Image (cartoon, rainbow, N blue to C red):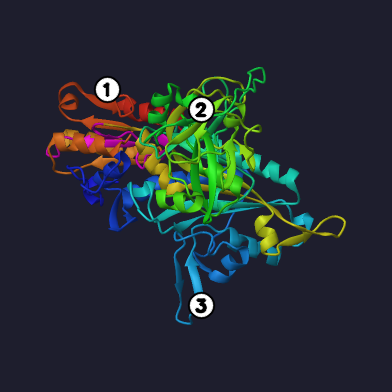
């Protein structure tokens, strides 16, 4: 492509609206333009990068035995009502009515639609397994769209759905997708991890997120430095504590602690450390107050709590709500003689002779012990992992790092097939619900994540497989016939070799051309200028590491062809 004929509107200044690197660089490099909040038009250069991801995704999905289809973006509300998700999904589901007052929604995902297709057309175990996928626009009405394509309202997604006879076969389908996703993100040239994750609004019993490691990631992930264990913070498991029954239990005592409500203040007053205190935190689970017991230096992981309580919504109670539910001011709550239901983090059960609130203003209790002095409804892993914890698999050291979610796979089970009456006949003639899995990739988000991970002060550094152009040729003197002829020949020879190439034939200063080439992140910059006119050599610069070489014209095309081939899996 010739730059002079391209819609490639680069910007010199950073847009004020951009908060993260990828958003800033995608606007500056002419990838896209904002239409309205969280919704963007993809310009040719940005769309070309997205198509690169789509190509890799299609190849690997087809390789794994999946078949492509395309489902409507508009979905009837009655399907979502049938599955029970129409209200449960929340305000991110954009609902509307047509001229006949029929309710519909814009699809944020397609479990209901694909299950409806299968229940109508697949009836026998002989037709299984099946895996169907699409690459399509999704819409989620985010409360606060931000970060460009990282958290937009409209985005391009690959979503796939598997249907199997039983759990064993569904596990095989899940593993096929797990392997396919690893191949996809490896081929995209990304540094990523597959981490255990919570299933959230999609549902199901098991899931993995695929996270691109980047300092600007929205999510914190936990990685073992010794083994392959990895999980997001919501799912990261804390190893069960060791119980020491040899410690003698002391008599419980009531201590006056005037005005001491915070953990730090109580610990200082009583000359203890936070590890010797148990705090009682009150949450409203679907409106019902629940006390959560936690060691003083730990924090609740709300997703774990939500899953334990099987609640649709949980929120930490305000001070007034705490008092209304317990009759006790915040800061003095405790498990002994309390009036609300209690759950405890597993660490609390292993503690001995700890301090708690006394359920009376200005008083605490010391030498409190679970089972002797109080009982709880449930004991579970309810807290956030810290770097002081050990890996639950190998006891290795854990590292917390930042990541960007680019893919998520779920083992759904039969929740959707049962709700929608999707059944097949097994080999004994019995009706059974399909066992399902679903598998998503944020195609447009992959491009943003790649930029977050691959950039420098001058612009994007595209991994070769995702680069819309593999090479850019800079003609530094359009009036010099010899330089122009050499530029044109290299350009045509690269195209003949199947190398996507941008020829910068604009009447611009060399400095402007260099800056745009760096900004666009094209892997190979071929400069035809004074060195060619004086010495007959061409300057080639690799964007990934800044290495520059001078080579003769005859070697330029083989050099680039070889480099592209080596970087493309």
Q: Which residue is mark 1?
A: 548
Q: Are marks 2 and 3 in contact (CB under 8 Å)?
A: no
Of the pair 499 and 15, the residue shown nearer to us: 15
Residue 547 relative to residue 105: left or right: left
- Residue at 11%, 39% in the rendered image: 479
Q: Give the percent coordinates (x, y) of residue 57.
A: 51, 45
Mark toward the viewer: 1 or 2:
2
At x 38%, y 49%, the residue is 151
Residue 102 disc label: 3
Point out the stretch of residues depicted in magenta: 457-479
Q: Disc 2 marks which residue?
A: 223
* Residue 181 screen position, x and y as percent: 55, 39
The nearer-to-camera label among 3 and 1 is 3
Badge 2 marks a residue whose secondary structure is strand
Of callouts 3 and 1, the N-terminal one:
3
What residue occupies the far top of the structure in this picture? 246
Q: Please tell me which residue lies in front, 19 or 120.
A: 19
In the rendering, at what x and y percent does residue 10 appear? 22, 45
Vertical order, 284 against 368 (above or below)? below
- Secondary structure beneath label 3: loop
Between 362 and 152, which is closer to the camera in this rendering? Answer: 362
Residue occupying the far right of the picture: 428
Which residue lies at the image location 41% right of the left edge and 50% below the top edge?
Answer: 318
Q: Is residue 468 shown in magenta? A: yes
Q: Is residue 394 above or below residue 101?
A: above
Residue 183 appearing in the image: no
């Amino acid at each position: 492509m010739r730059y002079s004929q391209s819609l490639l509107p680069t910007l010199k200044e950073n847009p004020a609206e951009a908060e993260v690197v990828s958003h800033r660089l995608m606007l500056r490099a002419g990838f896209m333009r904002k239409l309205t909040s969280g919704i963007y038009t993809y310009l040719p250069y940005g769309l070309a990068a997205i198509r690169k991801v789509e190509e890799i995704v299609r190849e690997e999905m087809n390789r794994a035995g999946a078949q492509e289809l395309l489902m409507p973006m508009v979905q009837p509300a009655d399907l979502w009502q049938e599955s029970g998700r129409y209200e449960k999904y929340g305000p991110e589901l954009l609902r509307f009515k047509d001229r006949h007052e029929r309710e519909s929604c814009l699809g944020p995902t397609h479990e209901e639609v694909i299950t409806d297709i299968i229940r109508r057309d697949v009836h026998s175990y002989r037709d299984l397994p099946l895996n169907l996928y699409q690459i399509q626009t999704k819409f989620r009405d985010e409360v606060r769209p931000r970060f460009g394509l990282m958290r937009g309202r409209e985005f391009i997604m690959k979503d796939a759905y598997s249907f199997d006879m039983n759990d064993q076969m569904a596990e095989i389908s899940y593993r096929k997708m797990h392997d396919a996703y690893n191949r996809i993100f490896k081929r995209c040239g990304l540094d990523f991890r597959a981490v255990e994750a919570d299933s959230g609004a999609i549902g199901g019993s098991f899931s993995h997120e695929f996270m691109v490691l980047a300092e600007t990631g929205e999510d914190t992930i936990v990685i073992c430095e010794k083994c392959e264990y990895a999980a997001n913070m919501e799912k990261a498991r804390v190893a069960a504590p060791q119980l020491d029954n040899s410690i003698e239990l002391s008599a419980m005592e009531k201590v006056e602690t005037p005005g001491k409500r915070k953990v730090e203040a109580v610990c200082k007053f009583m000359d203890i450390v936070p590890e010797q205190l148990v705090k009682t935190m009150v949450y409203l689970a679907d409106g019902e107050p629940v006390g959560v017991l936690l060691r003083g230096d730990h924090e609740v992981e709300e997703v774990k709590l939500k899953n334990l309580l099987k609640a649709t919504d949980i929120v930490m109670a305000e001070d007034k709500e705490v008092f209304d539910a317990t009759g006790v001011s915040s800061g003095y709550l405790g498990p002994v003689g309390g009036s609300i239901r209690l759950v405890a983090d597993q660490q609390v059960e292993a503690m001995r002779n700890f301090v708690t609130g006394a359920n009376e203003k200005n008083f605490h209790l010391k030498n409190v012990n679970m089972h002797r002095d109080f009982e709880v409804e449930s004991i579970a892993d309810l807290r956030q992992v810290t770097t002081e914890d050990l890996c639950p698999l190998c006891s290795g050291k854990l590292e917390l790092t930042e990541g960007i979610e680019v893919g998520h796979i779920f083992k759904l089970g039969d929740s959707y097939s049962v709700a929608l009456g999707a059944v097949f006949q097994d080999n004994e003639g019995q009706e059974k619900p399909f066992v399902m899995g679903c598998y998503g990739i944020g195609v447009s988000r992959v491009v943003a994540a790649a930029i977050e991970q691959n950039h420098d002060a001058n612009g994007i550094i595209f991994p070769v497989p995702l680069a819309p152009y593999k090479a850019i040729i800079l003609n530094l003197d359009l009036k010099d016939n010899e330089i122009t002829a050499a530029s044109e020949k290299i350009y045509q020879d690269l195209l003949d070799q199947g190398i996507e190439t941008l020829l910068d034939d604009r009447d611009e200063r060399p400095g402007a051309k260099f800056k745009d080439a760096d900004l666009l992140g094209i892997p190979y910059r071929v400069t035809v200028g004074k060195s060619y006119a004086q010495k007959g050599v061409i300057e080639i610069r690799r964007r990934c590491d800044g290495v520059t070489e001078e080579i003769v014209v005859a070697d330029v095309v083989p050099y680039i062809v070889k480099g592209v081939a080596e970087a493309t899996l």
